[in-house]
Each structure stands twice: as C-alpha cells, then as structure tokens.
Amino acid sequence: MNIAMLLDGTPRNGVERGQVLAKPGTIEAHSRFEAQIYLIPHNEGGRLSPIFQGWKAQFYFRTLDITGTCELSSSTPMVEPGEHVAITVNLIAPIAMQPELRFAIREDGRTVGAGVVTRPLS
C-alpha cells in the first residue's frame, strides 16, 4: 500500500529511501534471510553464467537496493540460469522484512533474478 504523508518539521535528510512506516511492533528489521529464487536465463535477458557460493548481487526490495551475499546449500555447488533454488542471503544492513516479501535480483543495472523471502533469520 502506498500513502502520502506530511512530516512537518522533519528535515529533508531525516528520511531515506527504503525506509518503512509501520505500526510499532508489527515488523522487524533483518539482515539475514532464507529465500526461494529464480535466475533468469540469458535468452530472457538474465545471466549467462551460473552462480556459486558467496555470489554478491543487489537485492531490490520495495524502493531499496541493497547488496547481499548468497549462501548455497552444501548439496548445491552452483545454480544455473533458469533454475529455481533455495538460498540464504546476508545483507550489508538490516531492512524491514517479513515472509512472502518479494524482491528482484540485479547485477550490472539489469534484473537477473527474482525471489521471495521464505524466512527472516536475524
């Protein structure tokens, strides 16, 4: 849901892109989460090469781009474009999130994947 809000007396630098307005106690900030992702194949405008443990990308939540590192399970050494896979992501800073929050994965200014948060961790 999008709303307009008057923040009378708040300086311009007091609000940053990606901040969330919520009722106190209804949402928490997390910097680590589990997700189900889909990597877009090259013929659809996505990646040409697979991803491996420790792959870094930009995760786009709502209006916020934030860098994160991917952890693959021990049974999945790499993920080819076109595959669906469960991963764990470590973000550089905590953001407001909850299960079923959708996000895009970007690399070099283009969208290379999409995902959904399955479980916030910390």
Image (cartoon, grey):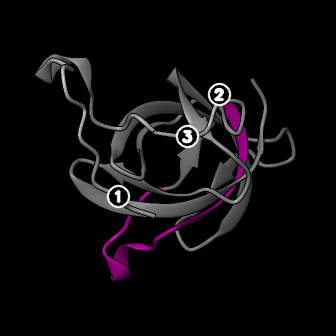
SS of the residue at dot 3?
A: loop
Q: CA distance from mark 1 to mark 2?
A: 24 Å
SS of the residue at dot 1?
A: loop
How far across and how far down the image is residue 101, in percent?
Answer: 61, 56
- Reply above or below: 108 against 92: below
Region rendered in magenta: 30-49
Give the residue pinned by disc 2: 30
Q: Is residue 41 left or right of residue 9?
A: right
How far across and how far down the image is residue 26, in percent?
Answer: 71, 39
Give the residue pinned by disc 1: 3
SS of the residue at dot 2?
A: strand
Residue at 62% across, 41% down: 97
Give the residue pinned by disc 3: 22
What's the amino acid at mark 3? Answer: Ala
**Which of the marked residues, 3 or 2, is nearer the chain's N terminus?**
3
What's the amino acid at mark 2? Answer: His
> 30 or 1: nearer the eye?
1
**Which of the marked residues, 3 or 1, is nearer the chain's N terminus?**
1
